[in-house]
């Protein structure tokens, strides 16, 4: 790790936003968010192909990972050059008529690995997907994005450090905290739910710092996930 990369892992400002494909936030809305908050890393869900114009407006570097069978994908922007992200396929439902498979976009920024996620709606399945992601990450790491999860999540070695306020209004009736961040080896100095804009999700902002000595540990013990009534990755689940 170079000195420049190491410097970028301290005092990181990270934003995550589900853009709401086609009818939600467009490239100009995303550019306005960047210009207002100046994130070190912007993680996007439901990003369509028109977002590729973002560097033409605000500079920086942009990578998008399409999702099979969908018009949208996961995308990341940073003012600094990044190693090319990798796509991590996630566990899928075994039920007939299942939806297309999902993936996580794994981004490396200095000593920290970030998993940009848009998890499945099934509450068994999205916990299983989280466990799969956690087991693929070494050292300081954060799983950030749209979890589609209801209720608390426990993931060994990780803490829920995201904002506690609702980030999504389901059917304009029920407020949900769908957008989350679970992290290992990081502390959150500040967090905020930002104005929603034209999407149906609020962006979340996190000010992160690497915990002392965390970057020296390149691997951690395998994660386990638990929540009342939920199983682990060793079991096949049929939830969508």
Image: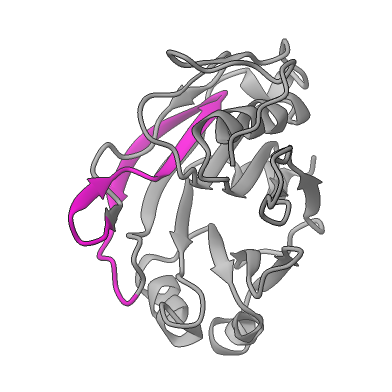
Looking at this view, name the residue that lies furthest to the top: 221
State the image quarter where residue 29 is shown. bottom left
Q: Nearer the viewer, residue 175 or 7?
A: 175
| Percent of width and height locating residue 135 | 74, 24
The residue that appears at 39% across and 80% down in the rendered structure is 32
Q: Quadrant of the C terminus?
A: top right
| Percent of width and height locating residue 70 | 67, 69
The residue that appears at 63% across and 71% down in the rendered structure is 72
State the image quarter where residue 185 is shown. top right
Q: Quadrant of the N terminus?
A: top right
In screen coordinates, is 109 left or right of 197?
A: right
Q: Is residue 53 above or below residue 95?
A: below
The residue that appears at 28% across and 52% down in the rendered structure is 193
Which color mode does the image show? one colour
Q: Which residues are magenta?
A: 170-198
| Percent of width and height locating residue 93 | 69, 39
State the image quarter where residue 206 is shown. top left
Looking at this view, name the residue that lies furthest to the front: 96
Q: Nearer the viewer, residue 155 or 8?
A: 155
Q: Is residue 75 above or below residue 56?
A: above
Q: Is residue 194 above or below residue 177?
A: below
Q: Is residue 222 above or below residue 30?
A: above
Magenta run includes residue 233: no
The residue that appears at 47% across and 14% down in the rendered structure is 229
Number of numbered markers: 0
Magenta segment, prevailing SS (helix, strand or loop): strand
Magenta run includes residue 175: yes
């Amino acid at each position: 790790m170079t000195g420049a990369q190491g410097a970028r892992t301290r005092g990181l400002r990270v934003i995550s936003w589900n853009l709401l494909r086609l009818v939600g936030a467009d490239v100009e809305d995303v550019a306005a968010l960047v210009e207002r908050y100046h994130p070190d890393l912007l993680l996007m869900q439901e990003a369509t192909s028109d977002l590729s114009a973002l560097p033409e407006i605000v500079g920086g570097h942009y990578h998008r990972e399409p999702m099979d069978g969908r018009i949208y994908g996961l995308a990341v922007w940073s003012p600094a050059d990044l190693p090319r992200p990798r796509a991590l396929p996630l566990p899928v439902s075994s039920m007939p008529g299942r939806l297309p498979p999902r993936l996580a976009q794994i981004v490396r920024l200095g000593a920290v690995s970030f998993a940009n996620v848009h998890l499945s709606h099934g509450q068994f399945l999205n916990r299983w997907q989280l466990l799969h992601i956690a087991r693929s990450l070494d050292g300081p790491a954060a799983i950030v994005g749209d979890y589609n999860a209801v209720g608390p999540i426990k993931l060994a070695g990780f803490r829920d450090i995201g904002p506690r306020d609702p980030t999504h209004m389901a059917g304009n009736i029920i407020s949900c905290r769908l957008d989350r961040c679970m992290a290992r080896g990081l502390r959150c100095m500040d967090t905020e739910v930002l104005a929603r804009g034209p999407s149906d999700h609020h962006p979340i902002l996190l000010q992160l710092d690497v915990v002392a000595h965390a970057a020296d540990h390149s691997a951690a013990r395998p994660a386990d996930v638990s929540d009342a009534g939920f199983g682990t990755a060793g079991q096949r689940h049929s939830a969508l």
